[in-house]
Amino acid sequence: MTDTDAVVQPRKKGLTRRQKRSLSRGAQYVVFVAAVIAFAVSADWGRLKNQFAQADIAEQMFPDVITLALKNTVLYTLSGFAVGLVLGMVIALMRLSSVGPYRWFAGVYIEIFRGLPALLIFIFIGVAVPLAFPGTEIVGGTYGKVALALGLVAAAYMAETIRAGIQAVPKGQMEAARSLGFSPARAMVSIIIPQAFRIILPPLTNELVLLFKDSSLVLFLGVTLEERELSKYGRDLASTTANSTPILVAGLCYLLVTIPLGFVVRRMEAKAQEAVK
Amino acid sequence: MTAKTLGGHPEIQVRALHKSFGDNEVLKGIDLEIGRGEVVCVIGPSGSGKSTLLRCVNLLEEPTKGQVFVGGTELTDPDVDIDAVRRRIGMVFQQFNLFPHLTVTENLTLPQRRVLRRGKAEAARVAAENLERVGLAEKADAYPSSLSGGQQQRVAIARSLSMGPEVMLFDEPTSALDPELVGDVLAVMRRLAQEGMTMMVVTHEMTFAREVADRVVFMDGGVIVEDGVPARVIGAPRHERTRHFLSRLLDPAMAEVEEETSNQVGGSD
């Protein structure tokens, strides 16, 4: 009943709603800062520094960590993205098709590849494909396998994004194109898809960030020294030096790419927001 | 029907056209002929089926029953090359439907190049000519979003004209415009009519209908109620439903609150 009293006679308590709100916000902030400080103080920084921040080990990683590991990570990501984009576009168009079996196939594909961990797809590509098609080599060796595995996973997510983008283009655009004499396919390619891509550029870039991280799964395919990417490279070095500094350096290399990409996405989203107004 | 056919066979011919959306029968047997060079305004209350009729003429809506001919070609023939026929039919929408990712000039050249396979220079020349025609030559490099509604609609008309259509369809071309922008669009349409274009215009602009149209068709409840010269249909309507519609349109403030009788269907004349 006290609650009701407070609502009926708020003035008697002495604090306005606004004052109460700032008081509660201040309390939350104090608790938050205290928790961070307690955590920081209780950690053993000396041992962490020993294990993760050895300057000489970090030094000997350069320039290979950039010229080999980061380069390979970027290569794997971009090739996976390219495969995913093409395949995702096909799946999205099948999903929107008027032909029932196409829609059905696309739906099943999306559910399967969205539902499975990327790790399993990598193992599947590494093991099942050579078994199923003995004697055949996936074009491009490891690079081809990674592009295929990442692409298969990315296509499922991208297909849904692309479909949403196509459906977000106003119906009148297709009608205008058709009444000018465009065939359905030509209207899709010339008019609808270019507009859809403007809408889905931010989510597609997010997908690129996800792929960038998933490219670390390549280590389950078994790679040569020359084919190592950031995670594998960092782990290998960590075991030879018996120190975790390479892991930290590899992690920083990921952030070197993902943080600027995230910034670009936010810029694009802000611009898209503005365009809507 | 008082179809005035100026040159041989009618440019647009609609025969016993029916259109249903599910259980809702929107067109209940429409017969209409429009001669070459004729300007026909279709008027009627909202929900009367006038926009659906127009959209059936270029098959944006698939008729449920009946036939549509444009320039002697039957569009309702299942084997017709609909894209080829649509090249001869210009369509102007209430919401303009310009392509927002393209500049004004690209809006005019892309369809010519992709659909008509015209060369770059030829397409650019036709585009410039038609922008001049609608008085927007100086907006050639602008994007649609930077134009007023009236300017966008004139660009949309120029885009249709660039395809060299024999017939132009207008679906409430001024209904989405601020009142002060309506005049420019109507001026362009009036000039087009004077140049001899065959036009079918769904509109609420009675002044335009009276001054520019050769014929006015009044639709209500999915049928054509009256069809005749503007002076007759607008000036001296024979049917109660036409009189009723016109009185509400011309003086909305005077309209009385009444029961829902106007949606019921009677016979056509």
Image (cartoon, coloured by chain):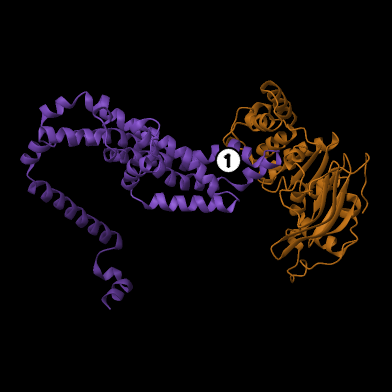
Say whether residue A215 is visible: yes
Which of B155/B126 is in front?
B126
The residue that appears at 76% across and 49% down in the rendered structure is: B78
Which of A121/B38 is in front?
A121
The residue that appears at 15% across and 49% down in the rendered structure is: A36
* Residue B165 picture quarter: top right
Secondary structure under the numbered disc 1 in the rendered image: helix
Q: Position of residue A245 (x, y in %)?
A: 14, 34
The residue that appears at 71% across and 45% down in the rendered structure is: B174
Residue highlighted by disc 1? A192
Which of A65/B36 is in front?
A65
Q: Position of residue A127 (x, y in %)?
A: 33, 43
> Looking at the colours in the rendered structure, which chain would you say is drawn in orange?
B
Give the left or right position of residue B236, taking residue B143 as reference. right
Give the left or right position of residue A64, taking residue B217 as reference. left
> Looking at the colours in the rendered structure, which chain would you say is drawn in purple?
A
* Residue A3 picture quarter: bottom left
The residue that appears at 10% across and 35% down in the rendered structure is: A242
Which of A257/A250 is in front?
A250
Give the left or right position of residue A122, taking residue A230 as reference. right
* Residue type indicated by callout 1: Ile
* Residue B162 picture quarter: top right
Judge whether A7 appears above or below A53 on screen. Answer: below
Q: Residues within 10 Å of mark 1 (few under 14, many from 20)?
A: many
The chain letter for the residue carrying disc 1 is A
Q: Position of residue A33 (x, y in %)?
A: 17, 50
